[in-house]
Image (spheres, helix red, strand yellow):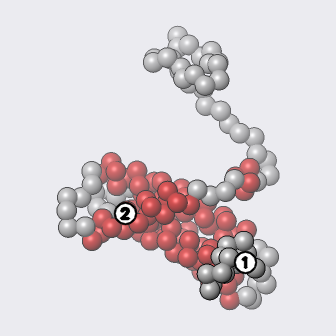
Amino acid sequence: MPDTQQQPAGRTPARGTAQRARTVYDPTGTLDTRLPLDRAPHEHLAAKVLSWKHGGGTPPPQADIDQAALTLAGYARLLIDELHRTTAALLPTAPARQRARALCANAATLLATPALSPTGTLDPALARAQLVADLHTELDSLHPADPSGPHPAGDETP
């Protein structure tokens, strides 16, 4: 019988022992809305995947392609949720809200397709990388520039 005792914090169970899955109770579905999206690593991953399309070298191993596609798919779902939250305050007829709605509909169609290619192609990973880039572009167009940043002329005084 496997050992299912609770391990002390910061320790991993010994090899051969079972780990218990933990379920987070979040009835309102807002737990992930309080955490900022980790944009830089996902942007880098999307750029790397898009570079595979034009890279003349050896393609990466299929396991790397599959992992990238799955990671980008999960991140794209978070971006879609963020886009919905951002556009919820806009009027239903606002062009930005209509653009975002169309992008989210296209994203839902894409994400409904398998993330792993049965034939071992780059296509699903490339599509998800492009989707992440498009979602970032749309979110950037909806968020105003950071007022604490430098001014367009380079003058850092307000």
Q: Is residue 119 left or right of residue 87?
A: left
> Distance between the Cα atoms at labels 2 and 1?
39 Å
Residue 127 seen in the figure: yes
Q: Is residue 14 left or right of residue 49?
A: right
Q: What is the three-letter code of the residue carrying label 2?
A: Val
Q: Is residue 39 above or below residue 133?
A: above
Number of numbered discs:
2
The quarter holding residue 155 reads bottom right
Mark 2, Cα crowd under 10 Å, few <14 / some 14-19 / many 20+, is: many
Residue at image point 62% right, 58% down:
37
- Residue 35 image offset from top left, x and y in percent: 69, 53
Element class at badge 1: loop
Label drawn at residue 49 = 2
Mark 1, Cα crowd under 10 Å, few <14 / some 14-19 / many 20+, is: few
Residue at image point 27% right, 54% down:
60
Q: Is residue 121 above or below residue 105?
A: above
Label drawn at residue 91 = none
Q: What is the three-letter code of the residue carrying label 1?
A: Thr
- In this view, the residue in front, 150 or 157, is 157
